[in-house]
Image (cartoon, rainbow, N blue to C red):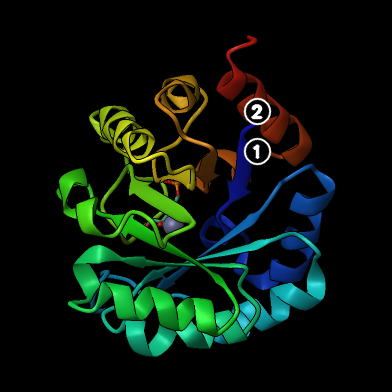
Amino acid sequence: MTIIAPSLLSADPGRFREEIQAMEAAGADWLHIDVMDGHFAPNLTFGPWMLEMAKKATSLPLDAHLMTSDPLKYGPVFAKAGADYVTVHIEATPHLDRCLNAIAEAGAKPGVALNPATAVSLLDSCLSLPQLFLIMGVNPGFSGQPYIPSTADKARRLRALLESRDLSPLVSVDGGVNYKNAFSLTSAGADVLVSGSVLFQEKDYKAAIGRLRAEASGIV
Ligand code: DX5
Ligand code: ZN
């Protein structure tokens, strides 16, 4: 079954705690927390405080997505703040292996993210350590951007590469996920769908998650 991970970037900032609890009650599987430093990505968002707060507010797994220039420094910080998964961008560090090990040592599952223009083949030498791979469906920075249609093919190429090595980490797609493209993404091998604007713009979160889950499974 597809893991549905609402992105708190689209939540009402004055009501984070209530939004987290509403998404949990509505059937979310994980919560996705987008960390941007104004340098790697053109926006400023959450610090480790958000993980600490969310950890107290929910028992859902917390999926931290670091769009930051110094993941070796901050990856372990977010692991210690309570993230279950800490995903860093391959474009952000010359020391990816060191960074993933540091995150694991700090107690979180390490993940690797790829920007839309980054080739799957770059992952060739770092396939076994990550427990999650995140394929961006938009350029990092903002919720509500249009989906880049080549994303599903990219997820398919990644899944094939992983299978050729007998590896089965989670594959996540983040950015521009909607009701229309959900099934193409899960058919391509995505296990996790991150969604910001599509879920949070609905009044009824339970119905929105149910619809995305149904579309992802292809039963509608
Ligand atoms: C983009 C973030 C995404 C974003 C998703 O930089 O990584 O998680 O919030 O939002 P939507 O689903 O609206 O594209
Ligand atoms: Zn994200």
- For residue 24, side relative to residue 29 (left or right): right
The residue positioned 26% from the left and 52% from the top of the image is 139
Q: Is residue 78 above or below residue 87?
A: below
131 and 152: which is toward the camera: 131
Instruction: Give above or below for 193 relative to 47.
Output: above
In space, the residues marked 1 and 2 are separated at their CA atoms by 15 Å
- On screen, residue 133 above or below 66: above
Image coordinates of residue 32 in percent, x first then y, are 56, 58
- Name the disc covering residue 46, or none: none
Residue 190 appearing in the image: yes
Which residue is denoted by mark 2 in the rendering?
213
- Locate residue 57, reporting x and y percent: 80, 71
- Please tell me which of labels 1 and 2 falls first in the chain: 1
Residue 202 tag number: 1
In the image, what residue occupies the spot 35% across and 79% down?
Answer: 99
Secondary element under disc 1, as helix, strand or loop, is loop
Q: Are marks 1 and 2 in contact (CB under 8 Å)?
A: no
Question: Which amino acid type corresponds to the residue marked 2 in the rendered image?
Answer: Arg
